[in-house]
Image (cartoon, helix red, strand yellow):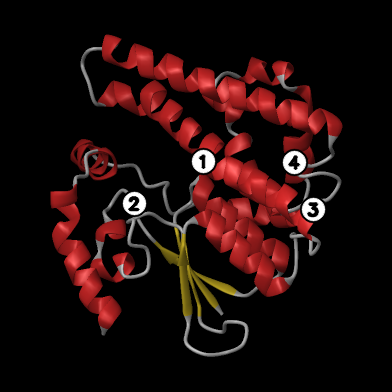
Amino acid sequence: MIDVHYWPTPNGWKVTIMLEECGLDYNIIPVDIGGGDQFKPEFLAISPNNRMPAIVDTDPTGGGDPITIFESGAILEYLAEKTGKFMPSNPRDRFKVLQWLHWQMANLGPMMGNANHFKNYGKNLTSDPKQLEYGTKRFVGEVDRLSGVMDAQLAANEYLAGSEYSIADIITWPWAMLIGRLIDEASWETYPNLKRWVDQVRERPAVEKGFRIGRDLGERELTEEEEKSRRELLFNQTNEKVRHAREEAAKLAKA
C-alpha cells in the first residue's frame, strides 16, 4: 500500500494520475495546505520542504522498511521504476522522457505558479495594482513561451517525449490543461498541437479518475478570516516561522 499525502492541486494530481495509470493500491492522507497541515512536524518528517505531495511506500520493491519520497518528479520516477511502466528501458528513450520531466519541474510548473500568483492571488495581497504589473507580464509571458515550446514539440511527436505515453506526459498534463484558464481560452488557438495533446491525454480513464480524486477536499467556502490566514500560510513563510516545526520533524525522523 502507498500512502499519498495529498491535496487536489496540479502537483497532487500528478501522483494520483500516475497511481491510477499503474493500477497501484493507495491511501489518500489529506494535507490541507490552507490550514497549515504542511507545517506539522509529522509531515515535515516526510517532506522537509513543507510541500505536498509526498508518498510513503509501505511495501517497497525488495522489501525492507517503508520508503518515503517527496517532490512529484522523484515520486513519478520511483513509481515508474517500481512498476516498469511509462518509462523506456533503453537509455536513449529513457533520457528523452527524463529531460521533459525535468523541464516541467524546472519550467512549466514554477512559471505557471508564479503567473497565477501575480494574476489572481496578488490582488488580495496588495492595494496597489501597479505592484503586480511587472510580475504578471513577466510570468504570463513565460507561460506563453513555454506553451510554444510544447506546441512545437507536439507538432512533431504524438507525446512529449516521442511516440509513447510516459511520465513526461503525466507530470506535465495537470499544469498544461490549465493554460487556457491562466492566459485566456482563446489562447488555445495559438497552440493547436498542445490542445490536441491535452484533449487526447484527458481521454485516458486513469487520467480523468486521478484528476477527480479528492475534489471535495478544497470546496468548503472559507470565512474572510480563514482566507486571510490561508494567504499568510501560503505566501509569507520565512525560515523563522517554520524553524520550530523543522526541529520537531528532525526529532521524529531520528526516532
Which circle, 3 or 4, is nearer the viewer?
Answer: 3
Identify the element where label 3 is drawn.
helix
Report if the CB atoms under discs 3 and 1 are less than 8 Å apart: no
The residue type indicated by label 4 comes to: Leu
Circle 2: is it few (<14), some (14-19), or many (20+) Cα within 10 Å? some
Residue 176 position, x and y percent, is 62, 35
Looking at the image, residue 255 sits to the left or right of residue 53; the answer is left
Label 4 belongs to which residue?
A: 160
Q: Amino acid at mark 3?
A: Asp
Q: Residues within 10 Å of mark 4 (few under 14, many from 20)?
A: many
Q: Is residue 139 above or below residue 85?
A: above
Q: Residue furthest front?
A: 91
| Residue 33, numbered label | 2
**Can you tell which quarter of the image residue 209 is in?**
bottom right
Name the element at disc 1. helix
Q: Mark 1 or mark 4, which is nearer the start of the sequence?
A: 1
Label 4: element kind: loop
Q: Which one is closest to the eye, mark 1 or mark 2?
A: 1
Whichever of callouts 3 and 4 sits on the residue coming sooner in the sequence is: 3
